[in-house]
Image (cartoon, rainbow, N blue to C red):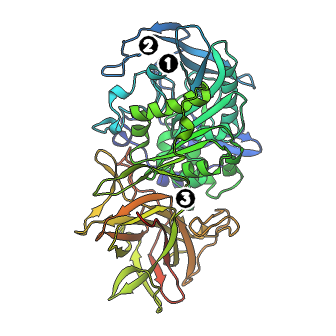
Amino acid sequence: MAVTGRRPDPEAMAFHCPKIGPAMWGQQQEDRRNMEENMNITKDLDGIDVIFRKAVVNENSTNHRLDERSFILKKGSTQREGGMPLKSDVLVERDVAVTLRDGVTIRADLYRPVEEGQYPAIIGWSPYGKRGGMLNNDLFGHPTRMDVPVAWEDGLNKFEAPTPAYWVAHGYVVIAPDSRGAGNSEGDIHAWGRQEPEDEYDLIEWAGEQAWSNGKIGLTGNSMLAMSQWFVAALRPPHLAAIAPWEGASDIYRDTACRGGIPEFIFSEGIFGRLCGPGLVEDIPAMTATHPLLDTYWKTKIAELENIDVPAYVVASWTNLLHTSGTFRGWSSISSTEKWLRVNNTHEWTDYFNPDNVDDLRRFFDRYLKNIDNGWETTPRVRLTVMDPGNRDTVNRSEAAFPLERQMTKALHLALQDGKPVLSHESQTEPASLSYDVADKEGVAFSITFDALTELTGFFNLKLWVEADGHDDMDLFAFVRKRDTNGVVRECNVVTGRTHVGPNGRLRVSLRATDPQRSTELEPFLPFDSPSKLKPGEIVPVEIGFWPYGIRWQPGETLELVITGTDLLIRPEFPQLPPIPTLNKGRHIIHFGGEYGSTLLVPYIPGA
């Protein structure tokens, strides 16, 4: 370990990383360290100087105290008021020691059937704490626990992970580990890269060799627990038999840290600034500040999806602010011949704990971890939701593939009609422009009203010609939203009282370069490695790829394209969080018509 001079400017980070207070995170973090102290610890990881900070020591957590014991919880008992009763007796083994290849010992809680036998195991891997952890569905200040009833959890499950009460009764072992450096596990907490998947690999192999194991291990869980699956499955542990990533990013730079090349610090500071353990934690916010381009560091955090060949049940949604793109990329890029995609219309936690979906997941695991011939293979390879805000969503529509085979790309051109900005099927011959002050979050809007039922499902691509007045760069945000026949904006419901605006994309214009060899008509591929600042008066073309979406307009409803310098997305978990900071100054000018062919390309689905 070395202390180096390569650390972010504390004043810059103070701007980008405001202190997360109780209104945002449910409790005051009293032991937040001085920012300068947190940013001067670096470790050389495979030739890269990686910044670490001190992890939080949470002495009030039951996970803080080592508790090496075994005991049996009786069928019918409950572990929290209103929680799911145990459906069978459960043998609990706490803080089981697992030694990794480098000699580091991590700790895991095991939940097993009491009857002797050989069982498959399912693992939910994360640094959040195997019990009494830093997060749970009670902490978000939401009146219905993000639409996860208490009765859907048992009080034993770790955050975003399977419930032992259900799975043990069906003949599975549930393993809840603390990753390296978390809880009472030795070492420092690493985020993706090489170390973390190697550690999870070792746990998988340890579990597959235990006397109680049938040799088949599955992976499951939401968010961080899904992200880790892409990385470890790419290493092909011999005992890994199936994965079930439920909404998980697969390219950390493009999906979470710097979507569109715009750094995001606020959310990641709230997560990595709260991880608990005895040592250090990889400082993703600080690395984002010091590595704003997609360099060697971030390339270690792109999962090698093509190496994954085990059966996979992948769950995505259109409305996830972190994971939508990475989940679709994961499903489409893995080499597995046996893979299924289901797209839901709720929130990742609501969907994961819904009893119907838990039963569906068990059918998948029964097939590949127990070799039960239950007809799982007849499940449609793709089950889609189509959002229809203000009306009824379509759920679990069967499709053969994604993107849909019948998809047609249609062009909606930015234009003026009677002086009003519109989207037109015909391009405008005369050049024109509209501008907005970057402080005006409404920006500029172009619209088209559909006279027939219209479904757009797939990837969108916004091609613009833009100019910065008063600055040498631009952070652009673009949204497609729906207005009903009365002109009222209708947003997609995610959980009770929380909505999502609709299809969207973003771009830091200095990172606009695309790779033609990897780009398609609807999916531009941007390397994000070579910034090119704007000159005064320079008008440049950009492509803003939207994350995939499925949404429908009824006859007489309007599609509105909003272009702005402000992120309008609101996190359903943390609606108090402010928009991500930008570098915007002055005015943004949008050029269209004539030689400036600004166009929204949309994935039209005929016969909807």
Q: Look at the picture and state if 209 lies above or below 142.
A: above
Question: Which of the two discs, 3 and 1, sits closer to the camera?
Answer: 3
Secondary structure under the numbered disc 3 in the rendered image: loop
CB atoms at circles 3 and 2 under 8 Å apart? Answer: no
Disc 3 residue type (three-letter): Pro
Secondary structure under the numbered disc 1 in the rendered image: helix
Which percent across, then down, holds residue 336?
66, 43
Which percent across, then down, holds residue 207?
65, 21
CB atoms at circles 2 and 1 under 8 Å apart? Answer: yes
Answer whether residue 525 is visible to the viewer in this image.
Answer: yes
Disc 2 residue type (three-letter): Ser
Foreground: 273 or 361? Answer: 361
Foreground: 185 or 470? Answer: 185
Q: Earlier in the sequence, mark 3 or mark 2?
A: 2
**In the rendered image, which residue does mark 2 sit on?**
88
Crowding at dot 2, Cα within 10 Å, few <14 / some 14-19 / many 20+, comes out as many
Q: Look at the picture and state if 270 lies above or below 364.
A: below
* Quadrant location of the C terminus in the rendered image: bottom left
Q: Look at the picture and state if 448 lies above or below 119.
A: below
Judge from the rendering whether residue 217 lies leftward or rightward of residue 574; answer left or right: right
Residues at marks 2 and 1, CA–CA distance in whole angstroms: 7 Å
Q: Which mark is residue 403?
A: 3
Q: Earlier in the sequence, mark 2 or mark 1?
A: 2
Q: Which mark is residue 168?
A: 1
Q: Earlier in the sequence, mark 3 or mark 1?
A: 1
- Identified at 59% across, 80% down, the residue is 535
Foreground: 97 or 1? Answer: 97
Answer whether residue 41 is visible to the viewer in this image.
Answer: no
Q: Look at the picture and state if 555 lies above or below 166.
A: below
Secondary structure under the numbered disc 2 in the rendered image: loop
